Image (cartoon, grey):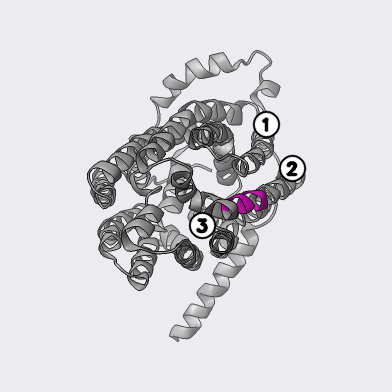
Amino acid sequence: MLSATRAEIESQETQSISGFFQGNLLALALSSAIRSLGGFVGIYIPLYFVQIGGNPLTLGLIASAAALVQFFTLSIGGFLADYYGRKKLIVIAALYGVIFPLLYAVIQDWLVFGALTLLATLGTVANPATHATVADSIPPEKRTMGIASLQVVSSLPSTVSPLIGGWLIENYGLENGFRLACVYAAALAFISIIPVMVFLKETLRSRRDKDPNFTVRNAVFSFPKSANTLPNSLKALMFTYALVMFANGAVAQYYILYASGVIGLKAFDWGAIVSLQFLTASALKIPGGWFSDKFGKRKTMILSLLTTAPTIVLFTLSRSFIQVVAAALLLVAAGIYYAPAHEALQADLTPKSMRGRITALWDIGNAVSLALGALIGGFTFQTVGPSVPFYIFAIAELAAALFLIKTVKEPRTKEA
């Protein structure tokens, strides 16, 4: 009886997933999957950055500055997505993103590398358009599972890409291996443009077509008034995610530095661990999306935060490859459900006509939080102790859970 029930659930999940992946979601999934094959470049940037003359503090400063650049790009991107359409923005940003891996491959000065990182951040102008397109393309009652499914399919190649990067570094050295990886990533980024350019369809008619008198200036000044009418739960939800982004900003650049400098792991070892993390995330995210849609997004998010906080401490206590693997996989298993549930709940609370701007507002808050987290993480890693940023992460995650419990409620009627 139990096996029959499980088989029925798996059959329903398979049908739901196949139903999601058509049209826009298929185009976005294919594009992201191709691009993620070269995603290992980001994993090894901290090691390469330190190798060419940087240090953890300057790494944190650059990450913080990049997050602040997003404050402006996301503001613009949100209005462009709601008033001029989504597709053009997504395609232009994809073309822009091809340039930077090629430039990374020839730069050997950490200051120039940092400046390029800030310029690359301008590509985030398309983030609100992408999030809005995804939300527009999934039925409200299946949003969490749809978003989770999209994230899984998009990131499946990530289960092997860190191993490729680690192999290149092990065989060609850190500098030459990283440069080869950048060329490989640029080629994949170029190929990834094809699905969105050919298959992606616009989901929102341009406001300029509807209203000839429309100007971005008027839209910008009218947004604060409309934002005041947003549900309190939506405002609180975005603040909670900002706390989570602060937590992640404090540690994101320093996992690999801690693993190599404190624990003593090699680049290939870390690549294998990251690959296992991606594999675990792929296996758990879709069931987690189904669980979230069925039993409640808010409950899923609270559970995720409460289990992630203590798990990060286990990582700081690890002193061997096996211990790091166990802690890293537990960390993924605890935290993987939060982002899809949040994005789905935010879509449930946001009118379709405002999704680009609300996503921009959400991303802006995240950018500021990420900048602050990266700055504090880099400072404490270098001057106080390498484990301190991870303790900051745990405290911020617990604070986010408490705020979520007290202030956020799921809507009775979901926005379409």
Gap in angstroms between the C-alphas marked 2 and 3: 23 Å
The residue where tag 1 is placed is 205
- State how far apart marks 3 and 1 are (Cα): 27 Å
- Quarter of the rendering occupied by the N terminus: bottom left
State the CA–CA distance, disc 2 to disc 1.
18 Å
Q: Is residue 180 above or below residue 166?
A: above
Residue count near mark 1 (Cα–Cα under 10 Å), binned few <14, some 14–19, many ≥20: few
Work out whether mark 2 precedes mark 3 in sequence or the reverse, and give the earlier one.
Answer: 3
Q: Circle 3 is placed at which residue position? A: 148
Q: Position of residue 219 (x, y in %)?
A: 54, 18
Q: Residue at x 45, y 41 (%)?
A: 53
Q: Is residue 35 visible?
A: no
**Closer to the camera, 373 or 407?**
373
**What range of the chain is rendered magenta?**
178-184
Residue closest to the eye, 241 or 300: 241
Q: Amino acid at mark 1?
A: Arg
> Is 131 on the left or on the right of 58, as rendered?
right
Mark 3 vs mark 1: give the one in front: 3
Q: Is residue 117 magenta?
A: no
**Residue 124 position by quadrant:** top right
Q: Secondary structure at mark 1?
A: loop
State how many labels appear: 3
Q: Seen from this angle, which residue lies furthest right?
A: 198
Nearest to the eye among marks 2 and 1: give it: 2
| Residue situated in front as seen by the camera: 313 or 59 | 59
Amino acid marked by disc 2: Met
